[in-house]
Image: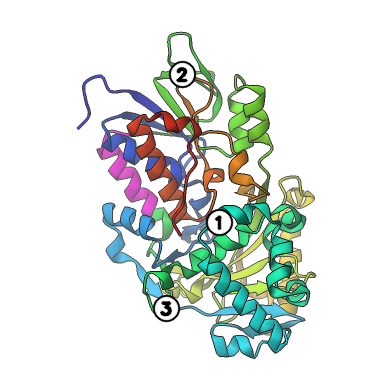
Amino acid sequence: MVQPNPEHWAIVGGGILGLTLAHRLAQQGKRVTLYEAAPQLGGLASAWTLEDIVWDRHYHVTLLSDLHLRSLLRELGLEQDMRWVETKTGCYTQGKLYSVSNAIEFLRFPPLRLLDKLRLGLTILYASKIKNWQRLEQVLVSDWLQRWSGKRTFRKFWLPLLRAKLGDNYVKASAAFIWAIIARLYAARRTGLKKEMFGYLPGGYARLFAQFSQVLQQAGVEIQLGCRVMQVQPLANGQVEIDFADRTSVRFDRVILTNPAPIAARLCPDLSRQEQAALNQIEYQGIICASLLLKQPLSQFYVTNITDSWVPFTGVIEMTTLVDPAEFGNRTLVYLPKYVAPDDPAFAWSDAELQEIFVSALEDMYPHFRRSDVLSFQVSRVKHVLAISTLNYSQQLPPMQTSLPGVYIVNSAHITNGTLNVNETVQLAEQVATQLASRAPAVHSYRVKISP
């Protein structure tokens, strides 16, 4: 129940992080207004239209072990509609496509010798048992993987995958980066599940956000779309003022910014030099992600990892191997992600240039594919997606509660020992909301601990 004259909180950013924060704060009796610059909710998980279908702008998948997301879906009345599918994994290497969906196929994987495969398997098993992830922050991922898997396995297997996700920035990443990925994939097995299943919500994230918006508004949360924040500054009377692009201003008791660190730093010019420096030193990977609607499937694999450097994208995600093709009018939906640094020249490439480059590569990879199969080709470009887990990363993050009274900066960079996915973003929001509710002094130096 909302208390008389409750604190008025503003949340900047309508992604899953901002929405979950708004949800939890409203449950605590706070008055909440949420601002989103885009015309729709969702952030990185938002949906768009390809021909006559509405689906996610970027690829997402839910694991059985994603308990925080599943709990939220249950609150929203959606969890019972989730569909669970066992998918297959492929690897494109040395110009050929291989299935690596089980142990037997992995042992047959030609690019690696038997010893390489054994060392690779032991590396993954060892990483899945590590509890003290903080010590991995002190070791470069390339050094750690070479130590456990060997130089040949690193060169043939790990290096292409690291480059696919981090580009040349892989040389800066700590071993905690690869540990977090392995930990998530092994989480279900640690909880006793026999095999990991991938899940999706019929209707995609567009359905989730429509339901979330309705639940929030019923709880009294005010949602303002198309509102671009230009500046956040504290006032002498203890309030915080938000200035918008339309030259209007609104005052609040407290403000949470969920923007990427460099953007949050720009929006808060009154932050100290140390805070500005700490926010701006967080290094991000961006993404250029093409969505293709095709007449026919490419393969049987949900994910195809790519180790050949000539391929212009860093993976092939064939959504229709997971999602019922009826969702797409019995057509095939494919994502072609290209992870790049925020200043990469590829961000300036036009959709037409990207389509020519990407489609030509598909023709080389899949002999049965024809460019006439492409019914729709759309490109999403985001410069700040993944905060790179550099050496001693968690120790260098600025506190979420800033030096500005009533101003908090909370974003996915605060997931210190996990991977960027919807489940851990929900967990981050819930832990932050709990800390804010307690008003414990520890919030000044609060760091989020993500449970695998």
Residue 58's disc is none
Taking 318 as reference, is 403 above or below it? above
Residue 195's disc is 3
| Whole-percent x, y for residue 403 in the image | 54, 22
Q: Do tag 3 and tag 2 residues touch (Cβ < 8 Å)?
A: no
Q: Nearer the viewer, residue 286 or 415?
A: 415
Decide which of tag 3 and tag 2 comes sooner along the chain.
3
| Whole-percent x, y for residue 303 in the image | 58, 73
Q: Amino acid at mark 3?
A: Lys
Quadrant position of residue 17: top left
Quadrant position of residue 269: top right
Label 1 secondary element? helix
Taking 129 as reference, is 168 above or below it? above
Q: Which residue is mark 2?
A: 240
Label 2 secondary element? strand
Dot 3, how many residues are within 10 Å of its Cα: few (below 14), some (14-19), or many (20+)? few
Give the magenta range: 208-222
Decide which of tag 1 and tag 3 comes sooner along the chain.
1
Q: Residue at x 43, y 9 (%)?
A: 237
